[in-house]
Image: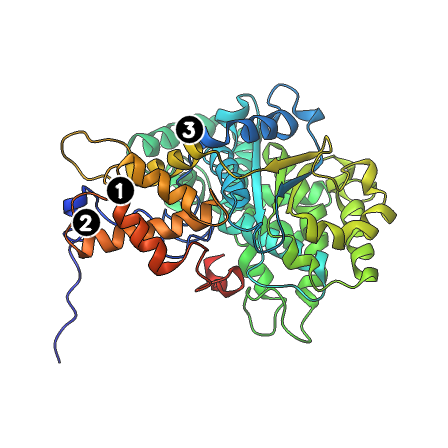
């Protein structure tokens, strides 16, 4: 039997060389998958210029670096259309943009004098029960997967070293700078037993000190151990008979979900607070996957739980005004929530109206904005060589035809998908540029609407 040969370079390198590209810049199914490695779909590529007004409104309402304590607590991010045409307009990309911006250094660049973080929740398919519990469970998993738990645990350990063993603090900080200079993650210093020992510390004492600190502020001992050890995922697995974390819900196994709200809204808030995070953002994407199967009674219950969790006294999250929560929606899912929203008293905080002060509308981009989006993807995959136009291999007239020729016109997901087929065809035909005729040909062959080859519900759960 022959051995498998490890690929030394991308098999696509030569395919796109004539187009001055290293790969096809556009995904066949341009659906944002936050945990994917592919930069074409994980939100890492973002043309902020075409969303300047939306970004500015988001910043003024929610980020508020100069007035963080008075930032908005509940906001709605709207797209036009129903749950189908309202998809792919850029809501998720916008949330991911802010998540990257803030979580890159836990808000140090964004806020300067304090730290914050973004927790992002999305559901790969529709939720049909235990709505707020599944939201809390998903939030906990994102906090672990994004590195937030590790970053906060490292900060907590460092705080305790400075407080209890100040004589060793400078040695630890010297190691941190050494790691940074070497291009290594400086956070790892606080979890490396050998490095801590080299600084004159007993690793087990450092962990114990962090746990004690959390217990002192009323965090359950077992949860405190999970946080301080960066082992929340292992702790959550113990609640499940199958020892898994996903899917979020399985029949007749709700122990973990029942504990999730308490851990997320109380104990994790205290943990982050003690670690030095003065507040956080909770982004809940694709709200329709939460609301579509709700009966009226369930919609009311969910809205009330949302209010109790983030706005009413009783939880650490609400008592400390800790989270700013953003829900993405469109008119159809908003209608589903409307009755519960009103009965829960949330209308006074965030009116279910795209024109409300607490709403941010994400319209389709302008034609120039759409071209900027194309250029952002192309630039990321530009191969080395002489300078070319930002839209190359597209001629400008071909690119304008592409973004305007789809239906709805200027719909990001649709024109990005069509761009994939145009680039692929040009590469297969050994072309070195793309003209108007080729774009017309592809639109006639593939249609002007987004292909239904993969819907959001089809995305594999591990992508999240």
Whether pointer 2 and pointer 1 mark residues with C-beta atoms closer than 8 Å, the reply is yes
Whether pointer 3 and pointer 2 mark residues with C-beta atoms closer than 8 Å, the reply is no
Instruction: Indicate which disc, 3 or 2, sits on the residue closer to the N terminus.
Output: 2
Q: Which of the two marks, 3 or 2, is nearer to us in this view?
A: 2
Is 165 above or below relative to 444?
A: above
Q: Residue furthest top?
A: 66
* Residue 58 shows in the view: yes
Residue designated by label 1:
381
Q: Is residue 115 left or right of residue 403?
A: right
Residue 126: % across, % down: 62, 63
Q: Residue at x 79, y 45 (%)?
A: 307
Residue designated by label 2:
16
* Residue 183 shows in the view: no
Residue 322: % across, % down: 69, 36
Q: Is residue 235 left or right of residue 191?
A: right
Residue 406: % across, % down: 43, 49
Residue designated by label 3:
173
Q: Residues within 10 Å of mark 3 (few under 14, many from 20)?
A: some
């Amino acid at each position: 039997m022959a051995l498998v040969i490890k690929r030394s370079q991308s098999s696509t390198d030569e395919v796109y060389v004539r187009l001055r590209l290293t790969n096809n810049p556009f995904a066949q199914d341009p659906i944002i998958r936050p945990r994917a490695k592919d930069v074409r779909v994980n939100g890492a590529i973002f043309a902020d210029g075409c969303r300047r007004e939306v970004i500015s409104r988001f910043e003024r309402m929610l980020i508020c670096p100069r007035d963080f304590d008075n930032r908005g607590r509940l906001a709605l991010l709207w797209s036009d259309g129903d749950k189908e045409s309202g998809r792919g307009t850029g809501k998720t990309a916008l949330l991911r943009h802010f998540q990257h911006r803030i979580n890159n250094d836990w808000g140090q660049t964004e806020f300067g004098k304090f730290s914050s973080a973004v927790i992002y929740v999305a559901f790969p398919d529709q939720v049909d029960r235990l709505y707020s519990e599944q939201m809390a469970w998903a939030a906990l998993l994102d906090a672990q997967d994004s590195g937030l738990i590790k970053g906060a645990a490292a900060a907590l350990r460092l705080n305790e070293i400075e407080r209890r063993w100040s004589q060793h603090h400078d040695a630890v900080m010297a190691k941190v700078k050494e790691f940074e200079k070497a291009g290594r993650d400086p956070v790892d210093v606080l979890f490396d037993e050998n490095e801590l020992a080299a600084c004159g510390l007993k690793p087990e004492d450092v962990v114990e000190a962090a746990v004690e600190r959390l217990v002192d502020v009323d965090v359950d001992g077992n949860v405190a151990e999970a946080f301080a050890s960066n082992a929340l995922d292992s702790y959550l697995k113990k609640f499940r008979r199958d020892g898994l974390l996903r899917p979020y819900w399985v029949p007749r196994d709700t122990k973990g979900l029942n504990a999730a709200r308490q851990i997320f809204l109380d104990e994790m808030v205290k943990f982050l607070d003690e670690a030095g995070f003065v507040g956080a953002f909770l982004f809940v994407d694709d709200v329709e996957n939460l609301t579509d199967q709700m009966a009226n009674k369930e919609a009311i219950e969910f809205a009330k739980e949302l209010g109790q969790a983030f706005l009413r006294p009783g939880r650490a999250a609400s008592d400390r005004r800790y989270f700013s929560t953003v829900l993405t929606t469109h008119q159809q899912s908003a209608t589903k929530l409307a009755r519960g929203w009103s009965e829960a008293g949330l209308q006074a905080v965030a009116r279910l109206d795209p024109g409300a002060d607490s709403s941010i509308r994400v319209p389709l981009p302008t034609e120039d904005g759409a071209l900027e989006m194309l250029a952002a993807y192309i630039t990321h995959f530009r191969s080395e060589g002489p300078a070319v136009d930002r839209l190359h291999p597209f001629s400008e007239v071909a690119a304008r035809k592409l973004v305007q020729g789809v239906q709805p016109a200027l719909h990001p997901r649709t024109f990005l998908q069509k761009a994939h087929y145009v680039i692929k065809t040009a590469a297969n035909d050994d072309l070195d540029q793309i003209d108007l005729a080729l774009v017309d040909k592809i639109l006639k062959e593939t249609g002007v609407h987004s292909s239904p080859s993969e819907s959001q519900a089809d995305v594999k759960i591990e992508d999240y």
